Structure formats: structure tokens, C-alpha cells
Image: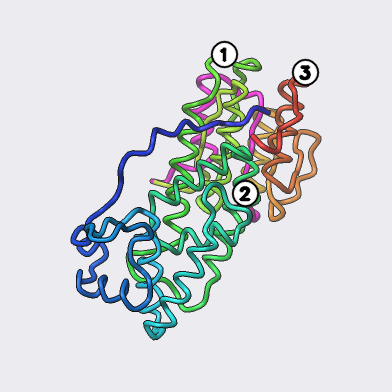
Amino acid sequence: MPRAIIEQSALADRSRTVSSVSDELGVSASTLRTWERRYGLGPAQREAGARRRYLPEDVERLRAMIHHVRAGLPAAEAAKRALAERARLPQSGPDNAAQLRTVVLADDYERLEEVLESAVASHGLVHTWSRFVEPALKSLRSAPGGDPVGSSPAIMLVNAFQRVCRCAYQSRPTRALIGGDRVAIISDSLHETAAQVIGVALAWYGCDARMLSSENYGGISTTERFREYVRGGVPALTVVLGCGPECAQTVENLVARYGVPTIMVGADAPEILSPQVQRVRTISACVEEALALLAPQADLELVGRS
């Protein structure tokens, strides 16, 4: 499957003054100067006699310092960790989920987007989700001690990745690689980001993929929502992400009424005994099986790296 290459604008001069960084981080300029003098946390590149100009990576390092200080570490130890973590940050895409987690905890949204864009450009959207984003999210959400109010690292990662998904969707080929089959993707809120990945991957091949929530908002059930959706035509395929008996009942009802081939995704997906229902464990396997069904002639060589 073709990779979703994300075009990046040329880097502008994003250097910052000490007062600008001070205002953003909520730390006095004198404290920043002290940290530079004592711990080497100033601008990485500074000419003698010139004013301090902080680059994004310098600000990233300071954010890590502040995070550790607020967590209760002495300033010297906090600085040591911040410097060590910055040295491990990837300059392009991450090598593993732990590196991505480090970028998230540095609390620099712009840098996080750049790292995710690089990962997608190198590995593709599906692979970036499976190898980096999903395990990083699990690690962030299971961290002891909780998150500061108004600053959830997991939410920041989800939001950044959703923006990258949108960029990948917008950069899809203008000429469909296969026909424009309608695909309904039904998901609960827990699996919504993974569902977006599937939708964007299938859209790259030319599918008309649409998301339908399985949550009961405003008293509207999934079955009713699907009924409105099929007014535009019965889909060639339904993909379902969810778990539990309610999910199983919904799928059984839809298959009985519309006879649409269905792929259930996830290790926690319910078992449904029907020749119309297939169960797969991973996002990559879902995309592969969907394309095998909709376009047997499609080139699947890079399907796991869409």
C-alpha cells in the first residue's frame, strides 16, 4: 500500500527570546538564566555576546526540567534527567514507542507533530499507529501518580495523531487505486482513533469510508444510525471496533438485515458465528483483509505500512 507522505513546509526561524520563553513556560527569566549558568539548560547554540535565542529543542528541554521539578525532584537531578532525555529524543521519527513517549512528556505539541509526521512519512500510517502510537498511549495511560489537571499527555498524543491522520487523508492520491466502494466503520469512543487509521488507509485506495459511532447519543442507536447511512447505498463492507454483548447484538442485527460482509477488529472483539463475519486481531490485518475482499487485484506489498 502506498505510504502517506506528508509534505512539510520549510523550517522558518523559530528562535525565541528569553522573555518569550519565560512567558510561555511560567518561569521567570532570571530562573532561566540561573538554569543556564548552573546546569547548562540554556540555548544549545549561542555566540559570545549575543542575546539568548531559544530554539524549539531548547524549550523542549526546559519543559522537561519543569516537569521533573514539579514532580518533586531537586533542581540538579531534574536538570540531569532533562538533559539525558533530550539526548534521546529522535531528530526525525522515533525508533520505538518509548522515544515517542519521551517526546510527548516534553510537552511541545509542535515538536510532537513533527515526529509523528516523520514516522508516517518513513513507515506509513498503519505502522506508525501499531508500532509507536498505540503502545505509547497504553504506557501513558497506565502511568502511576496521575496527570496534572489540564495537561494530559495521552490526550495531547491523540490530538496530534488525529491531525496527522487528517493530513494523510488530504494527501491521498487524486486517482483512486480501486473503485469507490462504500465502507462503514462502526466504533465506540475507546477505539475511535484506531478506526480513523483504518478509514484513512482504505480512503488511500479510493474507498468511500465513513465513521459511525456505536455510542447511544441522544437516544439514537447504532442500528438507527446505520439505517440512515444506507439511504445512500448499502456498503460493500462494514468494519466494527468494539466489545461486549451489546456490540455482538448490533453486528448480528446488521448482518441479518443487510447481509453486509463484516470485519470485527481487536483481540477483545466478540465471537460471532456467521459466514458474513470475520474476526481479526490487528489494524494491519483489517486493512489487508478489507482490500483482499474489495480489490483482490490490489498491490498489498506495503499494506502494513499504509
Residue 21 versus residue 72 in the image, above or below? above
- As shown in the figure, which amino acid type bears the numbered disc 2? Cys
- Find the magenta span and give its range: 218-245
- Helix, strand or loop under label 1: loop
Asked whether residue 137 is drawn in magenta, I would say no
Question: Where is residue 139, by image quadrant?
Answer: bottom right
| Residue 277 point in image, percent of width and height | 75, 38
Nearer-the-camera pick, 54 or 102: 54
Which callout, 2 or 3, points to the residue nearer the camera?
3
The residue drawn where x is 35% and y is 66% is 62
- As shown in the figure, which amino acid type bears the numbered disc 3? Gln
Residue 11 versus residue 155 in the image, above or below? above
Circle 2 sits on which residue? Answer: 247
- In three-dimensional space, the C-alpha distance between marks 1 and 2, rounded to whole angstroms, equals 35 Å
The residue drawn where x is 22% and y is 64% is 22
| Residue 40 point in image, percent of width and height | 38, 71
The residue drawn where x is 28% and y is 60% is 48
The numbered mark at residue 143 is none
The numbered mark at residue 297 is 3
